[in-house]
Image (cartoon, rainbow, N blue to C red):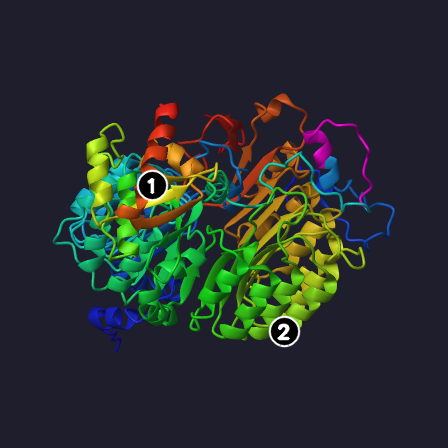
Amino acid sequence: MAYSFPEEVLEHVFSFLSSDRDRNAVSLVCKSWYDIERWCRRRVFVGNCYAVSPEIVIRRFPELRAVEMKGKPHFADFNLVPEGWGACAYPWIAAMAEAYPFLEEIRLKRMVVTDESLELISKSYKNFKVLVLTSCEGFTTDGLASIAANCRHLRELDLRESEVEDLSGHWLSHFPDSCTSLVSLNMSCLGSEVSFSALERLVARSPNLRTLRLNRAVPLERLANLIRRAPQLVELACKQLKALSGFWDVVPSYLPAMYSVCSGITSLNLSYAAIPSSDLVKLISQCQNLQRLWVLDYIEDSGLEALAASCKDLQELRVFPSDPFGAEPNVSLTEQGLVSVSEGCPKLESVLYFCRQMSNAALIAIAKNRPNFIRFRLCIIDPQAPDYLTLEPLDAGFGAIVENCKELRRLSMTGLLTDRVFKYIGSHAKKLEMLSIAFAGDSDLGLHHVLSGCDSLRKLEIRDCPFGDKALLANAAKLETMRSLWMSSCSVSFGACKLLAQKMPRLNVEVIDERGPPDSRPEDCSVERVYVYRTVASRRRLDMPDFVWTLDEDSSLRYS
Amino acid sequence: MEVGLNFKDTELCLGLPGGGGDNKTSGKRGFSDLKETVDNSSSSTAPLKDPIKPPAKAQVVGWPPVRSFRKNVMATQKSEEAALVKVSMDGAPYLRKVDLKMYKSYKELSDALAKMFSSFTMGNYGSQGMIDFMNEGKLMDLLNSSDYVPSYEDKDGDWMLVGDVPWEMFVESCKRLRIMKGSEAIGLAPRAMEKCKSRC
């Protein structure tokens, strides 16, 4: 007597599964579960837009409501991926416009998005709610105007750090008066002035507005006015909060209101604001519930000490360099600031820290203070700086980090580092998912330790390291368990790339080289860049520019 | 194991670091080496033990890893230093500071000052916010009223009536602002007109 649960019951049970991993596991149980699951999956995350094709996704999941996708590799942020490489959103947008009339949410990261795409989005989905474009490019404020005008139920519009061609600030006025649904608005990347009265009216009729990130052209007093109208704000960011002392001068009568807003603020992004440490401290000490702080190194060690004393709920800290190209330090920010915060903030789990000196002792102390780190990214401005006290490599320090922080998922390292640090990483960093390496290591052994030891590794990005063919080929199978591997200015030969592609038919091995066809040079010549990623789509993507080569099915070299 | 491939090529020898004659340690790609290729200066092959040299002018692509978006914003900001000036108003117990670069015209400044000192109503400035110095009659009317007018101290240390020069020039030369009663500002008017005549 075989009976199974009715489909509706299974669907209902599956609806409690939100994690993709759980849903993937469920769909592997048997054919009927696979089928039921795929019909009721509503959210999909595609970590690499070239790992799969729109057709495959649409065929498998016919009823999606939310799509999140990433395009270019992370090092594209630092100009290591040539312009025109790819990651165009249009093919996806066009396919989804046909297939998913009920789509509500689109989140894209590092993709090229055109005004055409934005217009298509605005016109294709009656119930569109969320548009998040992180580090995207290719569109103008005209595209934004379409979104504002046509998406009647828009809740979230977030353009974080996207490069938008700013034709005018007028787009904001395209939000109809009937639009009252905004929860989050982030337009901090735009340069031109928006109609401030339009902004004020929008804020006034958005009772659910919790997140507001404004662009640089908002004068201080108007900001204060705006804040008063939106007491429910939890996240506030503003560029060019110039002379915060001026800010406090200008708004004395608003101070009580400011304080009550401050105590509700959990996320503060002041990373574009040149504010001296003392003023920063005044603001931050009002924000006792702060969980996330992004700030420039103007905060200095003293400011970080104050932060450690007042913000006990702090989970994430990012300190950016105000003068990254200066040879000498312009502020008094050292490893000590990070040590203070790691001591004083028990919930701190995520750090991005730019500084000019580091020591093994400090790293060891930080590791002991904060074994709960999940993300640890340290950038020393001089990439091969040794321990400034002992002049030794920083192997021991980072070794302590991976040994103590057992839940570490993301690590970026800089400084003088030998193969030894990779040995530590391979032995201890079992939960590490993403690793970024630059100017480090001595030999292929370093890469081999990482590829063979890091069981959870998904993304590995390497630049300017003496890693080559041997480690890569010996660990070819590992690459299929990862999302992607990026190597630039290393010692990987064209011959090895070909071999790898032949060995592993489900990997796309892209040789990205602006010096012309790789077969016009000897096979043992190193390639400029190689980007390896697993894919179930065809290995030859159709939009390859002329500086990208991949191997075709018959192992012949193909380029567009 | 694929047939036909020279497997030896792909075999990795895992000797101890430093041990085993087989291990080819490919030369470490030093930052200082890279610097040389980027910047064809005189080659002092900096030994790797001495990497504390600051990066100097040669900048390696994508280093430090700051997003170009962020770099662009910081660069724009650097070129726009604030033009902070103190503002005082006769009879008011507090001083203020304004950043003149926040405003694009006298009208905007006037609005901002009005908000700051809410009892202050600025005299009639005409459509462009610039005092019509050539019309002595209008000027005298303004200064005889009980309205407040803004004056400023310029680079030469002279106190002038706000509005006598084009906005951009004003931003450059204004060091302080003082809002005074029209009747008190009368003393400034002739001097202001002199200066204006000599400039125009």
Q: Chain of mark 2?
A: A
Tell me if label 2 and label 1 are in contact, CB under 8 Å. Answer: no
Which contiguous range is marked in magenta?
A: B34-48
- How far apart are the two marked residues, 2 and 1, measured between alpha carbons? 68 Å
* Amino acid on which disc 1 is placed: Gly
Mark 2 secondary-structure assignment: helix
Q: How far across and how far down the image is residue A270, in percent? A: 45, 56
Badge count: 2
Whether residue A449 sits left or right of residue A291 in the image: it is: right
- The residue that disc 2 covers is A369
Residue neighbourhood size for the residue with mark 1, other residues' Cα within 10 Å, grouped as few (<14), some (14–19), many (≥20): few
Q: Which residue is mark 1?
A: B187
Do the residues at pointers 2 and 1 share their chain?
A: no
- Residue A70 visible in rendering: no
A262 or A443, nearer to the observer: A262
Amino acid identity at mark 2? Asn
Residue at point 40% right, 38% down?
B171
Q: Nearer the viewer, residue A202 or A136?
A: A202
* Residue lying at 36% horizontally and 29% vertically, measured from the top left: B194
Quadrant the C terminus of chain B occupies: top left
For the stretch drawn in magenta, what is the main secondary structure?
Answer: loop
State which quadrant residue A393 falls in: bottom right
Determine if the magenta segment contains residue A8. no
- Residue A1 position within the rendered picture, expressed as x and y whole percent measured from the top left: 25, 78
| Snapshot quadrant of residue A54 | top left
x, y percentage for residue A266? 40, 67
Q: Is residue A391 something one can see in this rendering? A: yes
> Would residue A432 be found to the left or right of residue A53 on screen?
right
Question: Is B116 above or below relative to A92?
Answer: below
For label 2, count other residues whose C-alpha is less than 10 Å away and answer few (under 14), some (14-19) or many (20+): many
- Residue B36 painted magenta: yes
Q: Is A78 in front, or is B126?
A: B126
